Image: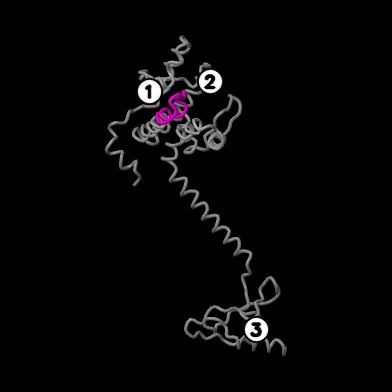
């Protein structure tokens, strides 16, 4: 049982139903207000240095920030966010979806505390919802620029590459923002991704061993080591009088000394190999 299964019975009643719809409505309201009063834009983003000066509304108004102020792209973005969020909400239930959004929100606040002058938006929340949706539904097809159909897993891959590059080369505030965007994803899916990678590694090792076995000969003479590759026309047989599973080529099947196990000993004696060598020399 995961920690989410333990938390859900206790805190389920705190979950907000239809949270995705509420976030969509908030962004629509923000889009209308900013279209009518664009000079008010600077009052909406989250900036902890201004929150410390008494502008507490910023702790909530950054949820109202639209993805873009371009009408066409805004409609596409808000539709896509509603599609992803409502799907996750239906898949997980209200509690887990609320928890996922709540972790992203707290991570955004944490970045604001670490870098008080950094201007923050709700992009971290939208980005984490996108990553979760792409992970659960990698084959979902979206139409980029309303022209190019592409599976969402490839868009997610490009996003992950951008995040890794930011973590490697970007300034620390940008690194913190990337971590805020992926922390809830890692908490929800990190364990599953680890075990998938582990089992995939084990499967690759198994396939490598099976491939190595295919390259090994099937028949081997217990005396001279001949096999069907070195002697393709040779006939091989198991000796029914030897104690154990011993196979011999046609030359050594009638001449070998039978193996008799003594304790842990389970191999032909040196005498049998020597006698077989003599018989070969004499033939």
Residue 138 point in image, percent of width and height: 51, 38
Q: Can you see residue 45?
A: yes
The residue at which mark 2 appears reads as 73
Q: Which residue is mark 1?
A: 59
Q: Quadrant of residue 10?
A: top left
Q: Residue sitting at 35 percent across and 45 percent down?
A: 2
Q: Position of residue 247 (x, y in %)?
A: 59, 78
Q: CA distance from mark 1 to mark 2?
A: 26 Å
Image quadrant where one finds the C terminus: bottom right
Which of discs 2 and 3 lies nearer the camera? The answer is 2
The percent coordinates of residue 193 (x first, y second) are: 47, 45
The residues colored magenta run 109-125
Separation of marks 1 and 3 at Cα, in angstroms: 87 Å
Give whichever of discs 1 and 3 has the lower sequence position.
1
Residue that label 3 marks: 252
- SS of the residue at dot 1? helix
Q: Nearer the viewer, residue 46 or 240?
A: 46
Is residue 86 visible in the rendered image? The answer is no
Question: Residue 225's image quarter?
Answer: bottom right
Give the spatial CA distance, label 2 vs label 3.
81 Å
Q: Residue at x 27, y 32 (%)?
A: 13
Labels 1, 3: front one: 1
Q: How is the image coloured?
A: one colour
Closer-to-camera residue (223/35): 35
Mark 3, secondary structure of its residue: loop
């Amino acid at each position: 049982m995961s920690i989410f299964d333990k938390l859900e019975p206790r805190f389920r009643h705190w979950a907000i139903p239809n949270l995705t719809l509420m976030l969509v409505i908030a962004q629509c309201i923000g889009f209308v207000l900013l279209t009518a009063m664009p000079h008010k834009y600077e009052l909406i983003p989250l900036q902890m240095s201004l929150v410390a000066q008494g502008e507490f509304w910023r702790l909530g108004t950054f949820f109202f920030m639209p993805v873009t102020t371009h009408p066409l792209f805004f409609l596409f973005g808000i539709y896509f966010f509603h599609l992803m969020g409502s799907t996750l909400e239906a898949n997980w239930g209200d509690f887990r979806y609320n928890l996922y959004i709540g972790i992203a929100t707290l991570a955004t606040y944490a970045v604001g505390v670490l870098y008080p002058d950094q201007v923050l938006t709700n992009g971290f929340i939208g980005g984490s919802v996108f990553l979760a949706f792409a992970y659960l539904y990698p084959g979902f097809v979206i139409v980029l620029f309303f022209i190019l159909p592409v599976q969402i897993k490839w868009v997610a891959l490009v996003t992950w590459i951008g995040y890794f590059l930011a973590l490697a080369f970007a300034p620390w505030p940008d690194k913190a923002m990337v971590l805020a965007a992926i922390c809830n994803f890692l908490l929800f899916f990190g364990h599953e991704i680890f075990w998938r990678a582990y089992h995939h590694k084990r499967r690759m090792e198994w396939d490598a061993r099976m491939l190595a076995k295919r390259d090994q000969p099937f028949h081997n003479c217990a005396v001279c080591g001949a096999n069907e590759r070195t002697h393709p026309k040779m006939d091989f047989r198991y000796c029914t009088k030897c104690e154990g599973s011993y196979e011999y080529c046609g030359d050594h099947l009638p001449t070998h000394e039978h193996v008799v196990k003594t304790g842990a000993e389970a191999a032909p004696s040196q005498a049998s190999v020597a006698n077989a060598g003599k018989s070969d020399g004499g033939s």
